[in-house]
Image (spheres, rainbow, N blue to C red):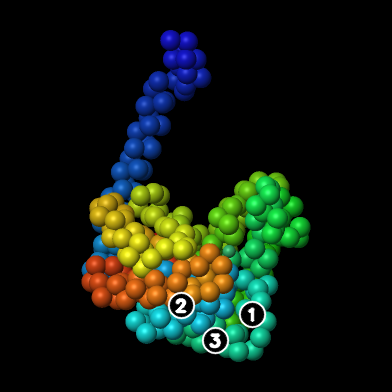
Amino acid sequence: MSVINHQYKYRLKPKFGRVYIGIIMALATAFQVSADTITYPNGAHVAVHLSYDDGLSSQLDHAIPTLDEYNIKGSFYLLPGSATLNNERQVEVWKKAAQNGHELGNHTVFHPCSSKGPERSWVKPYASLEQRTPEWMAAEVKMANTFLFLLDGQKRRTFTPPCFETMTGSGDYLSAVRPLVAGVYGRTLPKPEEVFWSAHNVSGQQLINYIKRSATNPRTKIIGIKFHGVGGDYLSVSDEAHHELVQYLAKHHDQYWVTTYKNIVDYIHQQ
Ligand SMILES: [Zn+2]
């Protein structure tokens, strides 16, 4: 009883509260309708995107050839500071991938993540999120945009926050970065309209099952699978498992609109 009284004491006057709730309900309904009515360019009701973080060599060696074999476009969140971008051959391969329709996404320059906890000993002091500010993060994302523009000539791309963490030592940086990118990975629609899975050490069938299971929810409009290593490097999925998934998606192109995350975000914003 005391809890109820306490809540009531701090609530807006009932009349204004009702108006406020009414506005929220109207907005929620409007949003729901728009999400429910999305039909993608190929007639599918669900979009699927495959994305790959950290610009790893195994993605060049295994993921891109498989995607190209089935003419599926992926989103690759590169790190200008990473070792895969320090030689001519790899730079050329990334350029070619972009010309071929794959998205080169922004993942910052130095991959700042929280350095808290013993499992984060790999985070270098200069890349510790706790040492950053939102302004600094925005400057770094701008820098990565410029670098990627030199590779692909594109001025808009989506962004994946490293480690999916956005809290700096002086507040969340996402609002400072949003205006600089076409979209933020996994944050275009609320759950369960949009879902994604960071997959590693799983079979092709498990990946396929995730897509199938997610698509059974009629509210789900965007399904993502996030990879790191493919047939090598770290947090890996085997080349075979990745191949099995890509083959499945190519076979069911009438059910899923499989494209880059940027294409999906742009399409939804146009609706
Ligand atoms: Zn990463």
Question: Quadrant for ligand 1?
Answer: bottom right
Closer-to-camera residue (70/23) = 70
What residue would you read off at disc 1?
A: 85
What mark, if any, has residue 205 been given in the picture? none
**In 3D space, how far apart are the residues under numbered discs 3 and 1 (Cα atoms)?**
10 Å
**In 3D space, how far apart are the residues under numbered discs 2 and 3 (Cα atoms)?**
12 Å
What residue would you read off at disc 2?
A: 63
Dot 1 and dot 2 residues touching (CB under 8 Å):
no
**In 3D space, how far apart are the residues under numbered discs 1 and 2 (Cα atoms)?**
17 Å
Q: Residue at image x 31%, y 72%?
A: 249
Residue that sits furthest to the right in the current view: 125
Looking at the image, tell me whether mark 2 or mark 3 is earlier in sequence order: 2
- Which image quarter: residue 250? bottom left
Determine the secondary structure under disc 2. Answer: helix
Looking at the image, tell me whether mark 1 or mark 2 is earlier in sequence order: 2
Image position of 110 with respect to 68: above or below: above
> Is the residue marked 1 within 8 Å of ligand 1, measured from its CB?
no
What residue would you read off at disc 3?
A: 93
- Circle 2: residue type: Ala
Q: Position of residue 19 (x, y in %)?
A: 38, 30
- Circle 3: residue type: Val
